[in-house]
Image (cartoon, helix red, strand yellow):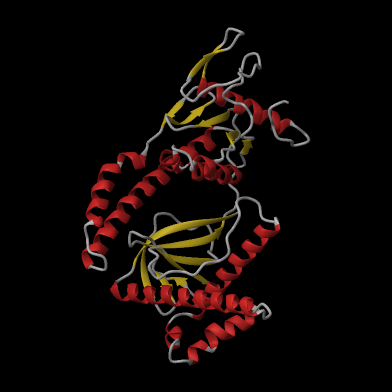
Amino acid sequence: MQLRYQFRLYPNPGQQQSLARAFGCARVVFNDALRAREEALAAGLPYPSDGDLSKQVITEAKKTSERAWLGEVSAVVLQQALADLNTAYRNFFASVSGKRKGRKVSPPRFRSRKDQRQAVRFTRNARWRITAGGKLCLPKIGDVRVRWSRDLPSAPSSVTVIRDAAGRYFASFVVEMPGEPLPEVAAEVGIDLGLTHFAVLSDGRKITSPKFLRRAERRLRKAQQALSRKQKGSQNRRKAVAKVARLHARVADARRDHHHKLSTRLVRDNQAVYVEDLAVSALARTRLAKSVRDAGWSQFVGMLEYKAGRSGRAFARVDRWFPSSKLCGACGTVAEAMPLNVREWACPCGAVHDRDINAARNILAAGRADRLNACGGTVRPSA
């Protein structure tokens, strides 16, 4: 299993300039290659091959006065920019033809120099290395100080240097992670995700939603009001933009930390984890959009999935059309309608249910049934 390990970088001012140059060169090569392919399409010419593009936008461009500064950065960075463009085109064509699952992918777009997030990737061909002193040695950049929060499990195959919107630098390593099966336990859990409570477990426990964005709204509002009063293009406006970005980064970091701790605990304590396959992108277009984005369900479920696979635990998503909230866990009766403001309901059989706990228990039962089903079919409501 391949995983990413991310560490904070602390480049000095000279190294920051070198990284900014690498970001800019990679962006220019990406845009030049994209423009060349669009012009060939508009002229009815054959699709330029990867070799022709590399020769045109890198090798030949370095010989011109307009692009001579491309030689100031590692050639691997420029080649990886072309690889990113090829990946974007493959994903687009696979999405158009129906071979790619999930949401439709749009064609590649030009990268803007005003984009606050920049990244470049170094493969093994770039001959980057980790020095004996624990620094990251990058070609034509130098030895960058790294804060190692943990050890790498294996030798990384590549490293991506990222500058986020808050002005922080990170090194993201791709490593091959062997499986680490945990001792088997008898417990299994079904999880009902929500907004009032972030997660309700089938054993009756309710995990309160931390609402990181809601708690930071006052500080964000003041920072954004101050930003709106700054003159465009001024140094004070750039400082205000960075302050807003730092506040958003603090919210995202706190949310990610919460998701990591909760997902690790659930995977460690349960042999099987079942969740509902929510349509998060659809819910994010409703009046609950801010609360849905603040909860970060997709990120949390993704963590559950890869941690369960690494630890030898079972993980499954229950079909979103399964009536987990309206199904009586005692007799199997399905209620006709149940508005969101109804948090408790009574079944004609006499059972009184807490809506969320009942949903979590039904998700657990449906997940178990689906897991034992030899056909592997999904659980859907009956006709």
- Identified at 47% across, 75% down, the residue is 26
Question: In front here: 178 or 37?
Answer: 37
Q: Residue 323's image quarter?
A: top right
Position of residue 325 measured from the top left corner of the image (x, y, whole percent) = 56, 24
Q: Is residue 375 above or below residue 325?
A: below
Position of residue 2 measured from the top left corner of the image (x, y, whole percent) = 58, 56
Question: In front here: 66 or 231?
Answer: 231
Q: Residue 383's image quarter?
A: top right
Position of residue 131 measured from the top left corner of the image (x, y, whole percent) = 42, 71
Q: Residue 315's image quarter?
A: top right
372 with respect to 193 (left or right): right
- Identified at 56% across, 32% down, the residue is 270
**Of all residues shown, which one is farthest toward the top?**
350
Position of residue 25 measured from the top left corner of the image (x, y, whole percent) = 44, 78
**Of all residues shown, which one is farthest toward the right?**
375
284 with respect to 363 (left or right): left
Question: In front here: 11 or 107?
Answer: 107
12 with respect to 123 (left or right): left
Q: How many marks?
A: 0
54 with respect to 220 (left or right): right
- Identified at 61% across, 39% down, the residue is 313
Quadrant holding the N terminus: bottom right
